[in-house]
Amino acid sequence: MVRSYGLREIGSGMMTLSVDKEVGLASRLAGDGLDIVTLGSALHSDNPKRDNVAIALVMVAGVTLLDLLAMGATTGRHMRHRGDIRDFSDRSGFPKGIPASRGLAREKAKALAG
């Protein structure tokens, strides 16, 4: 079980580092929920390591909070309103405008040659 949970964490970490970060962070949150349920099942009175389970549960809850914050920040940053159409018609792609770029290659070639 520990190995499968470790593989799940590696997979969600890889997805978090990919282009689609929201899916990776969502899988981390789902994994955190699974970890909390698993630890909660070990938090019974006849478990001799109940204190260790409680400490692990608090730590996983902290990581879950960090994952929630990361997901909120990423979702807010990458969210676009549906129906919004971006208008780039006023942009030429040249930082100083088209008139400033005319003849620039010729000038650079003369400077390099001479």
Image (spheres, rainbow, N blue to C red):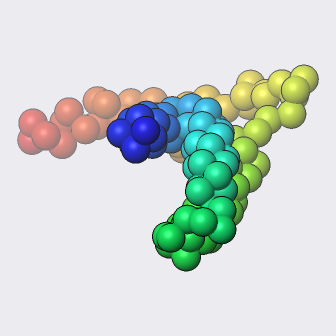
Question: Which percent across, then down, holds residue 47?
Answer: 55, 65
Q: Quadrant of residue 31?
A: top right
Furthest toward the left, the residue is 114
**Residue in view at x 66 percent, y 56 percent:** 40
Left or right of residue 1, residue 35 in this image: right
Residue 55 appears anywhere in the view: no
Left or right of residue 3, residue 82 in this image: right
In this view, the residue in front, 6 or 40, is 40
Question: Which percent across, then down, holds residue 29?
Answer: 64, 46
Work out whether 110 lies above or below 41: above
State the quadrant of the C terminus. Answer: top left
Work out whether 73 lies above or below 94: below
**Residue in view at x 56 percent, y 32 percent:** 20
Furthest toward the front, the residue is 46
In this view, the residue in front, 111 or 81, is 81
**Residue in view at x 87 percent, y 26 percent:** 82
Question: Which percent across, then down, holds residue 30?
Answer: 65, 40
